[in-house]
Image: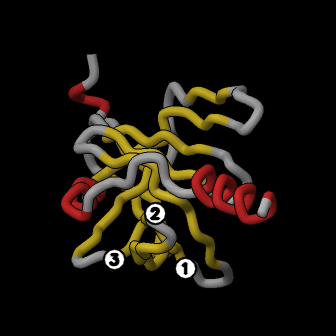
Amino acid sequence: MKSIFYSLVFILLVSCQSKPSQEDFTHFNGYWEIDQVVFPDGTKKVYQVNEWIDVFELKENKGWRQKVQPQVDGKFIQNDLKESLQIIDSNDCYYLKTKATYTSWIEKIVSVSKDAFTLENDAKIKYHYKRFVPYAKRK
């Protein structure tokens, strides 16, 4: 009986605390930069400037991500690598499945809004993204 109780408690702890809505995923589209990375022990790495940022394009839970390098004039230098993306609903959580040429991985979608989102990988490292603001528009 105790093992069943502990199993149920474990499942509740592992499940999503607050699941983003399907409508929130339209916010992924656009240019994003990593704001900070939070490690399982609570330490943080804050990014003041990102040399490369991510462009996301999703439609009906499928799409791609590509790295681009922003320029001062507002243009971008692109690389030729696009990673395919798919949003998966599993265990009352949403996950972002990424497939590149030689690898693939899955990250839990912790939160999504029009200005920020957070992904968590299997090592419990959280990547906090913020919407990219072109250099010319920064104060």
Residue 14: where, in percent of width, then height? 62, 55
Say above or below: 82 vs 2.
below
| Mark in front: 3 vs 2 | 2
Q: Is residue 132 left or right of residue 67?
A: left
Query: Are the residues flagged by discs 3 and 2 in contact, CB closer than 8 Å?
Result: no
Circle 3 is placed at which residue position? 63
- Residue 118 on image: x %, y %: 46, 45
Mark 1 or mark 2: which is in front?
A: 2
| Residue plotted at (23% across, 78% down) | 60
Q: Is residue 7 left or right of residue 22?
A: right
- Graded by Cα atoms within 10 Å as few (under 14), some (14 to 19) or many (20 or more), the crowding at tag 2 reads some
Counting residues from the start of the chain, the first of labels 1 and 2 encountered is 2
Quarter of the view holding residue 63: bottom left
Name which of mark 3 and mark 2 comes first in the sequence.
Answer: 3
Q: Secondary structure at mark 3?
A: strand
Residue 61 position within the rendered picture, expressed as x and y whole percent measured from the top left: 30, 75
Identify which amino acid the numbered label 1 is placed on.
Answer: Lys
Q: Which mark is residue 93?
A: 2
Identify the residue shown where x is 48% and y is 34%: 35
The reply to whether the C-beta atoms of the residues labelled 1 and 2 are less than 8 Å apart is: no
Distance between the Cα atoms at labels 1 and 3?
11 Å
**Residue located 51% across and 25% down the image:** 48
Q: CA distance from mark 3 to mark 2?
A: 19 Å
Q: Residue at x 68, y 49 (%)?
A: 124
Q: Which mark is residue 99?
A: 1
Check residue 66 in the rendering and tell me which mark sits there, or answer none. none
